[in-house]
């Protein structure tokens, strides 16, 4: 306390008589007021600094520490031999820090000018992110040019809200090469953000939007890191605390073979449709092409309105991956499945028809493409005689056909590891009842017999089905990414995220297998695609010429490009246990043999490459005599490896059934005499 | 004569004031270290030197002369306030400054405080020894109310409020019955309530500033921003503080104007509760010393003068630190002896000069 000063009262009192002293009580009261006020202030300090100091320390930290994301580079995509398909490149993006905006109207205009955007675009972007927290920078423009960068640097003080961020962007092959398999990336949409599988994504995140980019997004994207910057109230960096590095996304090796893909791309150039090539042993997809094409690079940076509009309104649907999404009548390629069904049921072996360019059934004339004369199963496949299959279909009945077709994967997804696969349609009486609440008419079965009518399949489904049949019934789940690329603990989850028929063995009797594959081999020698015979390559297959309009409708509307039939071909090489199966869909390509020429180009590339790799020009294997479909069980003893056969002998080398007796197959479910229960034509 | 006079100069008070001045310069240095205002601390030293000169000069003259001249000064004050309203520099939407030809900005409202203190002393001089009657109270109100309204019109709510303690201390010391005091208080409560509700007198931003200190989190970017950042600065200082020039709120420019209105927040952040409490204690000593001097004054006007100064300084400390710790709204009142600024420094030292003057005159007559 202060030394108490003695007040000389006498002096005061003796001064001018009229004056009196100011009441000392009041002065003392003022002292108490002073003490009281200062104590209240001290209490306020105590409350903030001593009682709640820790809380405020956290707030102060949050104030000054600014987490800047370090974007993880996205994993590259490689082909099966490790050749680069999709790479990244560094680019600079401009972000907007909304907290720094002082004068929105004027500054928005300035920003729009400097970044060569329209004012509307800037405002749209801001509007788009209105619900995300204010401190979060929002992407304003990606891949900015050096002069735009210079603009931002030069206006640091006027426009502190602009922030430059280096980021990795996707570089896709030119001209839409393999675009449908690869897919593209883009900013996550608001609808997607609401989905549970995107629960951990934030607005502005770049995600795969289609193809492998979408299917394997969680592996490709990696984990973003962050850098803790010390900033001042203007967000300017004034120091650094530390950083957490980004974990780069995983590079993925695709099953695509660049060379085969290239051949397929070339084959389909200027046409609409799809080609898919697959290794039937494993289900590895070697090539997948869909036309028309789009340019994923346009999506990787900033999609222009015009380009997007063009893509969306194109009647040929460039974004559609027709290899897995086109659901069309497979035409005569379906006859292979018909043949297996007919032979397994023991009907086709004995069927003989006399083809005179068509047949009358149920009071309707069903056309055939030619006058084939007498036709049995051995000729029905290469000649693709419709009459033979009309009759076979009639005898099998729709539900038997459907059962076989379904077991070969029609009408259901294959489970390929790409998004949005279509399941196609395999009609049956119960299907019709469920869908249309109508009885199945026997007449409808006749069209289905030649792959027309309500039946719809994707090129991939046809490749898998026919490749599987040629492999003796071993159907594999098609995939574009090697399974061992996916971490062990995630494989199951990935597999489950692509539901479908997957791997399955459909028992086919060896005799049936042999008959059908021989028939397919004859297609390219004496049959419908004889013109595309590949000298020295065991190239087999089946053509399809699928009407897009009925004969009657055609007669009414006349011909035109759009009314031409879709040309199909499913090719295999070699004819049994093939190393490759190629399905070609050439929309409005007319005769199936046109598609066959495209398939031949792909197969030729593949086989030549195969031979180059094996170091000689000999075909290493003769057509094997045991179907792969027998599975890997002990019941199958490997036969003596066949002697290498010279190239030119391959086609002549008649498949000799080995003397060894193949273990009797499990009785196929369709051979249980259920045919009797199937309402046949007679029942209608 | 000179020696005798300065024997009575309040060296203890001067010592305490100089101690605070050192704290002020150091904290201004720290608060402006990384800003474009770096260098303000040396200007503050110049202000302080000028202030000391003023203080010594004022302490030399006889304060009775000041009281004699005050009607003129009052007249000039009113004129200058009117001049500000007509021709003042408009800064941030308010006319508070007059630009003098020499390039100095002059804020008359700061000086009006001094004039009012002296004018109040003069007014009360003749009324000592009995209770004030109604007319006299009315005169007191008019004396303070006129300049207050003019300053309120600038608009400068904060400075105009600093005139209130002059009136309050005047009424208290001049003598007022409890009944009257209660009546006046009640009238004001009702009146202010009416003004608040009507929304005519106070501008919306003023109202927002007056309420946002209760819930700064409601509007962290608007008027609550300053309060919030101030609370964070003070609170995060903790017991021991972050150290001089190490306050993140102060150095990172989060704390608004940390060298003037929010200098105490900067001090709290960098020197913690201990530093802040010490500064409060020095204020406590200074204020008590002022009251002591008032008790020792040779005559009532001397007492009135010192108590007027005390009341204004206490009021400013209460409002400024109250604002910094979130107990008071943001009003833009500087903290005496700590805040940067020529007007504020010169006012404080002028006022202290009057105090010295009164003290030195205690044995006169």
Image (cartoon, rainbow, N blue to C red):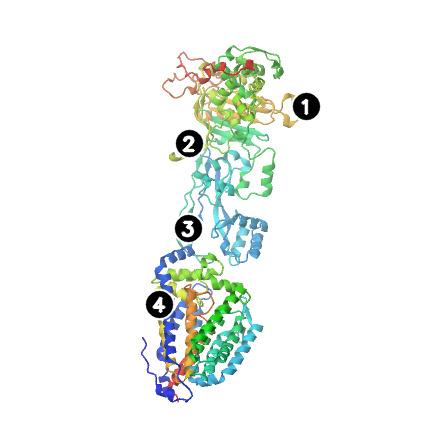
What percent of the width, then of the height, locates residue A79?
A: 46, 33
Question: How many marks are shown on the rendered structure?
Answer: 4
Task: Same chain for labels 1 and 3? Say yes or no.
Answer: yes
State whether residue B76 is above or below residue A278: below
Dot placed on the residue nearer the N-terminal end, 1 or 2: 2
Q: Camera-side residue: A212 or A505?
A: A505
Q: Are marks 1 and 3 in contact (CB under 8 Å)?
A: no
Figure check: A147 above or below A11 = above
| SS class, disc 4 | helix
Residue behind mark 1: A556
Q: Chain ID for label 4?
A: B
Q: Is residue B162 visible?
A: no
Give me the residue at 51% from left, 81% from top: B73
Residues at discs 2 and 3 both on one chain: yes
Of circles 1 and 2, the one toward us is 1
Tell me: residue A7, above or below residue A628: below
Q: Earlier in the sequence, mark 2 or mark 3?
A: 3
Residue ID for mark 4:
B277
- Residue A483: image tag: 2
| Res. B335 mark | none
Chain of the residue on which disc 1 is drawn? A
- Local SS, label 3: strand
User: What residue is shown with label 3?
Assistant: A227
Q: In the orientation shown, which residue stands out farthest toward the front? A: B179
3 and 4 marks in contact (CB < 8 Å): no
Question: Badge 2, how many Cα within 10 Å: few under 14, some, many 20+?
Answer: some
Q: Residues within 10 Å of mark 1 (few under 14, many from 20)?
A: few
Helix, strand or loop under label 2: helix
On whether disc 4 and disc 2 are found on a single subunit, the reply is: no
3 and 4 marks on the same chain: no
């Amino acid at each position: 306390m202060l030394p108490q000063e003695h007040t000389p009262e006498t002096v005061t009192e003796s001064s001018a008589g009229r004056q009196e002293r100011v009441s000392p009580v009041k002065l003392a009261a003022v002292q108490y007021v002073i003490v009281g006020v200062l104590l209240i202030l001290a209490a306020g300090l105590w409350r903030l600094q001593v009682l709640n100091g820790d809380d405020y320390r956290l707030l102060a930290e949050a104030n000054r520490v600014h987490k800047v994301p370090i974007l993880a580079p996205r994993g590259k995509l490689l082909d099966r031999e490790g050749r680069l398909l999709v790479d990244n490149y560094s680019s600079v993006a401009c972000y907007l820090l909304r907290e720094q905006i002082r004068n929105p109207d004027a500054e928005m205009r300035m920003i729009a000018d400097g970044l060569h955007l329209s004012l509307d675009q800037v405002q749209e972007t801001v509007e788009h992110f209105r619900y995300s927290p204010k401190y979060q920078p929002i992407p304003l423009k990606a891949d900015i040019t050096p002069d735009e960068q210079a603009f931002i640097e030069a206006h640091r003080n006027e426009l502190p809200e602009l922030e430059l961020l280096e980021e990795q962007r996707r570089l896709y092959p030119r001209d839409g090469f393999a675009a449908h398999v690869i897919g593209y990336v883009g900013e996550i949409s608001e609808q997607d953000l609401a989905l549970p599988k995107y629960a951990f994504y934030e607005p502005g995140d770049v995600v795969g939007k289609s193809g492998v980019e979408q299917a394997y997004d969680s592996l490709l994207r990696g984990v973003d890191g962050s850098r803790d910057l010390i900033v001042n109230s203007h967000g300017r960096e004034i120091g650094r605390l530390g950083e957490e590095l980004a974990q780069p996304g995983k590079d993925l090796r695709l099953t695509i073979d660049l060379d085969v893909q290239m051949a397929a791309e070339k084959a389909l150039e200027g046409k609409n449709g799809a080609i898919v090539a697959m290794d039937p042993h494993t289900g590895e997809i070697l090539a997948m092409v869909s036309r028309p094409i789009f340019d994923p690079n346009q999506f990787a940076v900033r999609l222009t309105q015009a380009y997007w509009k063009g893509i969306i309104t194109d009647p040929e649907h460039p974004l559609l991956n027709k290899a897995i999404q086109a659901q069309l009548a497979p035409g005569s390629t379906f006859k292979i499945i018909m043949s297996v069904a007919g032979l397994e049921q023991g009907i086709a072996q004995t069927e003989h028809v006399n083809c005179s360019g068509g047949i009358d059934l149920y009071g309707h004339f069903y056309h055939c493409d030619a006058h084939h004369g007498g036709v049995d199963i051995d000729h029905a496949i290469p000649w693709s005689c419709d009459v033979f299959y009309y009759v076979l279909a009639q005898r099998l009945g729709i539900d038997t056909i459907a059962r076989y077709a379904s077991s070969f994967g029609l009408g259901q997804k294959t489970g390929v590891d790409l998004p949005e696969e279509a399941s196609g349609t395999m009609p049956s009486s119960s299907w019709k009842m469920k869908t249309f609440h109508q009885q199945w008419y026997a007449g409808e079965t006749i069209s289905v017999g030649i792959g027309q009518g309500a039946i719809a399949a994707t090129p991939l489904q046809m490749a898998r089905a026919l490749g599987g049949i040629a492999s003796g019934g071993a159907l594999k789940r098609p995939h574009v990414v090697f399974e061992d690329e996916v971490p062990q603990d995630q494989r199951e989850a990935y597999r489950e995220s692509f539901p479908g028929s997957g791997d399955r063995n459909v028992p086919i009797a060896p005799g049936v297998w042999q008959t059908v594959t021989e028939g397919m081999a004859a297609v390219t020698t004496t049959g419908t695609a004889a013109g595309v015979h590949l000298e020295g390559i065991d190239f087999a297959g089946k053509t399809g010429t699928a009407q897009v309009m009925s004969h009657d409708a055609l007669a009414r509307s006349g011909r035109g490009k759009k009314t031409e039939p879709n040309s199909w071909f499913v090719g295999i090489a070699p004819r049994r246990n093939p190393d490759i199966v190629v399905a070609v869909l050439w929309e409005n390509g007319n005769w199936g043999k046109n598609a066959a020429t495209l398939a031949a180009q792909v197969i030729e590339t593949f086989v030549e490459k195969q031979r180059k790799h094996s170091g000689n020009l000999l075909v290493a294997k003769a057509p094997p005599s045991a179907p792969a479909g027998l599975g890997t069980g002990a019941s199958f003893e490997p036969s003596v490896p066949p002697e290498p056969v010279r190239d030119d002998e391959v086609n002549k080398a008649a498949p000799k059934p080995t003397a060894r007796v193949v273990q009797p197959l499990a009785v196929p479910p369709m051979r249980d005499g259920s045919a009797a229960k199937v309402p046949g034509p007679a029942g209608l | 004569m000179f020696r005798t006079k300065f024997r009575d100069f309040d060296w203890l008070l001067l010592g305490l004031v100089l101690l605070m001045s050192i704290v002020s310069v150091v904290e201004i240095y720290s608060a402006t270290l990384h800003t474009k205002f770096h260098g303000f601390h040396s200007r503050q030293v110049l202000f302080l030197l000028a202030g000391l000169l003023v203080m010594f000069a004022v302490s030399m003259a006889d304060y009775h002369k000041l009281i004699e001249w005050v009607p003129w000064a009052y007249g000039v004050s009113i004129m200058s306030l009117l001049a500000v309203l007509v021709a003042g520099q408009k800064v941030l939407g308010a006319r508070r400054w007059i630009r003098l030809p020499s390039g100095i900005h002059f804020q008359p409202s700061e000086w009006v405080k001094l004039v009012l203190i002296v004018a109040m002393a003069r007014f009360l001089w003749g009324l000592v020894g009995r209770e004030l009657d109604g007319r006299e109270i009315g005169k007191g109100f008019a004396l303070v109310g006129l300049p207050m309204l003019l300053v309120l019109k600038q608009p400068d709510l904060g400075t105009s409020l600093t005139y209130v303690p002059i009136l309050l201390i005047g009424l208290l010391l001049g003598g007022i019955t409890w009944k009257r005091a209660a009546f006046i208080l009640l009238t004001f409560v009702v009146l202010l309530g009416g003004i608040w509700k009507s929304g005519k007198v106070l501008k919306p931003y003023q109202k927002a500033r007056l309420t946002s200190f209760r819930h700064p989190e409601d509007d962290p970017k608007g008027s609550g921003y300053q309060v919030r950042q101030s609370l964070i600065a003070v609170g995060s200082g903790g017991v021991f503080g972050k150290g001089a020039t190490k306050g993140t709120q102060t150095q990172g420019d989060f704390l608004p104007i940390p060298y003037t209105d929010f200098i105490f927040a900067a001090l709290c952040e960098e020197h913690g509760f201990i530093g802040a409490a010490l500064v409060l204690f020095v204020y406590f000593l200074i204020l008590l010393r002022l009251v002591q001097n008032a008790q020792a004054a040779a005559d009532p006007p001397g007492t009135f003068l010192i108590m007027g100064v005390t009341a204004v300084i206490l009021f400013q400390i209460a409002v400024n630190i109250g604002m910094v710790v979130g107990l008071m709204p943001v009003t833009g009142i500087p903290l005496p002896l700590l805040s940067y600024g020529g007007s504020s420094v010169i006012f404080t030292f002028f006022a202290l000069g009057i105090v010295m003057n009164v003290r030195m005159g205690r044995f006169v007559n």
